[in-house]
Amino acid sequence: MSQRVIHDTTIECLQGNIADQPDMEAIVNAANAALRTGGGVAGAIHRAAGPGLEQECRPLAPIRPGEAVITGAHKLPNRYVIHCLGPVYGGDEPAAELLASCYRNALHLAEQNNIRSIAFPALSTGAFGYPMEAAARIAFETILEEAPKLTSVKHIRFVLFQAKDRELHERILDEISERRPEG
């Protein structure tokens, strides 16, 4: 696990299951537009949360690429789930701006709800096809831009399913945070 502290916010990367982060107040779902159970991250989160999550999501759907909504966590060990619809790579444009909006909007919802800790998956990199390295760069650039504005959020975690993805995220976090001096 790699950690950086930027503007009093700890940012870390670890390998694991996004639906099993009991020390995080909120987790982020790589949602589909209908906010329904799907495959990958959305499927894992919905299965762990139980049917109440999909019921709470129904009146919030549909959402558009770049948007985020917040719900309770139901049977998950967290308080909240923030659902983001990332762009489909090669289909939703401007993809980079839409992906950055996912991270920005998720952090804004966390701030509005006084959430202190939030765990993200690698949004849009699964079935939506966004290249992992490009997506990680957008994620960390956006988070580092937002970090000085964060007052509630003090712990941001990236949960990557595979070791190679965790290693890539750690490398990019190191590169970007070294280029952006604090303050």
Image (cartoon, rainbow, N blue to C red):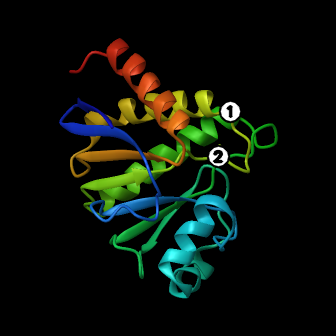
- Residue that extends furthest to the top in the rendered view of this protein: 179
Q: Looking at the picture, tell me which residue is in the foreground, 89 or 98.
A: 89
**How many circles with numbers are drawn on the protein?**
2
Quadrant of the rendered structure where residue 77 is?
A: bottom left
Residue drawn at point x = 36 percent, y = 30 percent: 144
Q: Tell which residue pokes out farthest to the front in this image.
A: 163
Amino acid on which disc 2 is placed: Ser
Q: Within 10 angstroms of label 1, few (less than 14), some, or many (20 or more) residues?
A: few
Q: Which of marks 2 and 1 is nearer the N terminus?
A: 2
Crowd rating for badge 2 (residues with CA inside 10 Å; few <14, some 14–19, many 20+): many
Residue 70 percent coordinates (x, y): 45, 67
Q: Which residue is drawn at 42% across and 60% down?
A: 27
Q: Can you say which quadrant of the picture contains the N terminus?
A: top left
Residue named by callout 2: 124
Q: Picture coordinates of residue 23 (x, y %)?
A: 27, 61
In the image, is residue 130 above or below residue 153?
Answer: above
| Location of mark 1 (residue) | 131
Q: Which mark is residue 168?
A: none
- Quarter holding the C terminus? top left
Q: Which amino acid does label 1 sit on?
A: Pro
Whole-percent x, y for residue 48 in the image: 50, 75
Task: Kindly give the residue lying farthest to the left in the view shown.
Answer: 8
Question: Where is residue 13 drawn, in percent x and y?
Answer: 38, 39
